[in-house]
Image (cartoon, helix red, strand yellow):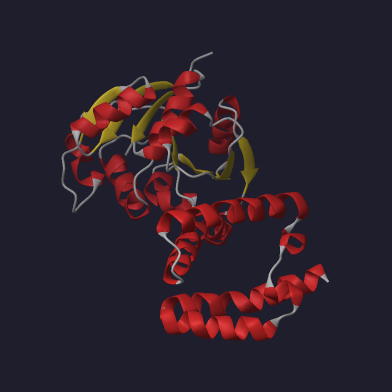
Amino acid sequence: MHKKTLSIIGAGKVGQVLGHQFVQHQVFSLLDVCNRSFDSAERAVAMIGAGRAVSVGNDLGNGIANGIAGAQLRIPDVLMLTVPDDQIATTCQALVDAGMIHAASVVFHCSGAKASTELRAAIAAGAKVASVHPVCSFANVAHLVEHFSGTICSLEGDDAALAVLLSAMQSIGARTVGISAGNKLLYHAGSVFASNYLVSLMELALQTYQAAGIPAEMAMAMAQPLAQQSLSNVFQMGPAQALTGPIARGDMATVVKQQLQVAQWNEQAGAVYQAFIAPTVDLAAKKQ
């Protein structure tokens, strides 16, 4: 059977991880890896393990789309766009204008917040489109490259595109879940709460310890087991049963005094503390 060809446009962390998986598991034949600079494209090719490095130039103001026309890209069966969210539509349009996308093409992007409808230029050209979003942190690319199997990936788009991509994702060991285009923003917000804002919350916890006179190294040592055990309890027992502390005990007098003192120290931190009171009260009610 003919192995479909793939090119990657904007191979940053996500593009490198998925590209490596596709090559390692012989899912696609990789043609071009196109980045703004030739150096970054070469580094991406080295990480992926295949492909030809292609540069579109370092015009940061216009993003990667500005140099597509002169990039001398080969036309693949499948195009993966891993450019920043606000460049997906313009990059797709540039690829259509350059003749890179046609009625038989499968085009997908990897944004968590944007739907496949962002690829409107490809849709107008008759191509089949989709979005694929790995639900994981890309902070440590080297680790993720070696431990991608089992990662949950959400997919939505045309049936024809999904037929290709579901098989591809399953071939690299991903667990897949379907999602509607209209729910992408809300779905992605869940990932933001579970990952990005969790990191911000831990930074705020460390700052609060230090404001109370705890040295930074000791603050980290105090927060780590508390946070890790709390997360472990959430996934073992469920959020309601994992909840402890003054609100879980019904000690609202302490909560009020604590919020006031946090706000006196740091107004922004006090606002965050206040914002968590109502949902935590609701969660405590479920526990009872």
* The C terminus sits in image quarter: bottom right
Residue 262: percent from left, percent from top: 49, 79
Residue 170: percent from left, percent from top: 61, 29
Q: Going by the picture, which residue comes out furthest to the top?
A: 1
The answer to which of 168 and 101 lies nearer the viewer is 168
In the figure, is residue 158 to the left or right of 7? Answer: right
Q: Tell me what residue is drawn at x 42 percent, y 60 percent.
A: 215
Q: Tell me what residue is drawn at x 58 percent, y 25 percent.
A: 171
Residue 60: percent from left, percent from top: 19, 49
In the figure, is residue 228 to the left or right of 30? Answer: right
**Is the residue 67 above or below the residue 271 in the image?**
above
Residue 151: percent from left, percent from top: 58, 37
**Is the residue 67 above or below the residue 6 in the image?**
below
Q: How many marks?
A: 0
The answer to which of 229 and 188 lies nearer the viewer is 229
The answer to which of 61 and 3 lies nearer the viewer is 61
* One can see residue 136 in this view: yes
* One can see residue 113 in this view: no
Q: Going by the picture, which residue comes out furthest to the right?
A: 288
Q: Tell me what residue is drawn at x 61 percent, y 50 percent.
A: 228
Q: Tell me what residue is drawn at x 41 percent, y 58 percent.
A: 216
* The N terminus sits in image quarter: top right
Q: Quadrant of residue 103?
A: top left
Q: Quadrant of residue 29?
A: top left
